[in-house]
Amino acid sequence: MNKIINELLLEKSTTDSKASTKRSPRLTQNSKLFKTVVNAIKDKKGESIISLDLRNIDEAVADFFIVCEAQSSTQIHAIAANIEKEVKDNCDEKAYHTSYGPHWTLIDFVNIVVHVFDRDQRKFYDIEGLWADAKHTEHLDK
């Protein structure tokens, strides 16, 4: 029994240390990565762009979520591909994880997680409502 408990504690401490390395350093809305993501969305005509500042929420897995919507699966893919390209070209970073889907694509840059939805899926999953404690900032289409 003690052996199992020790193994679980060791596994948890390893997981905790990986999580703490994953989260540092903190970003701001003025960071190059943040601005590049928002501009890449705008370049492909992403709509209703909102950022959620999660830095003051202990349970948050990132510093920011950036959420936008597109009118078709083709546009979702174009936005996501443009984000990855622009971030690689301008920030010399690659996504930690990307999950492509026809209605929702997620791109994880560790401190920034980008959600590109179609309108129905965005309403259904209501990321903004789930993270209502976060500061919401609207990024107007300019």
Image (tube, grey):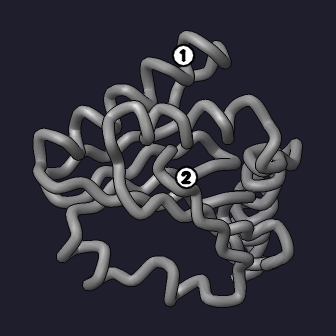
Quadrant position of residue 131? bottom right
Residue located at (83% from left, 49% from top): 28
Vertical placement of 97 versus 120: above or below? above
- Graded by Cα atoms within 10 Å as few (under 14), some (14 to 19) or many (20 or more), the crowding at tag 1 reads some
Vertical placement of 16 versus 23: above or below? below
Q: Which is nearer the eye, 108 or 136? A: 136
- Graded by Cα atoms within 10 Å as few (under 14), some (14 to 19) or many (20 or more), the crowding at tag 2 reads many
Whole-percent x and y of residue 3? 73, 71
The disc label shown at residue 107, or none: none
Residue located at (74% from left, 46% from top): 22
Whole-percent x and y of residue 53? 73, 67
The disc label shown at residue 113, or none: 2
How many numbered marks appear? 2
- Secondary structure of the residue carrying numbered label 1: helix
Check disc 1 and report the residue beneath it. 88
- The three-letter amino acid code for the residue at tag 2 is Val
Disc 1 to disc 2, C-alpha distance: 15 Å
Closer to the N terminus: mark 1 or mark 2?
1
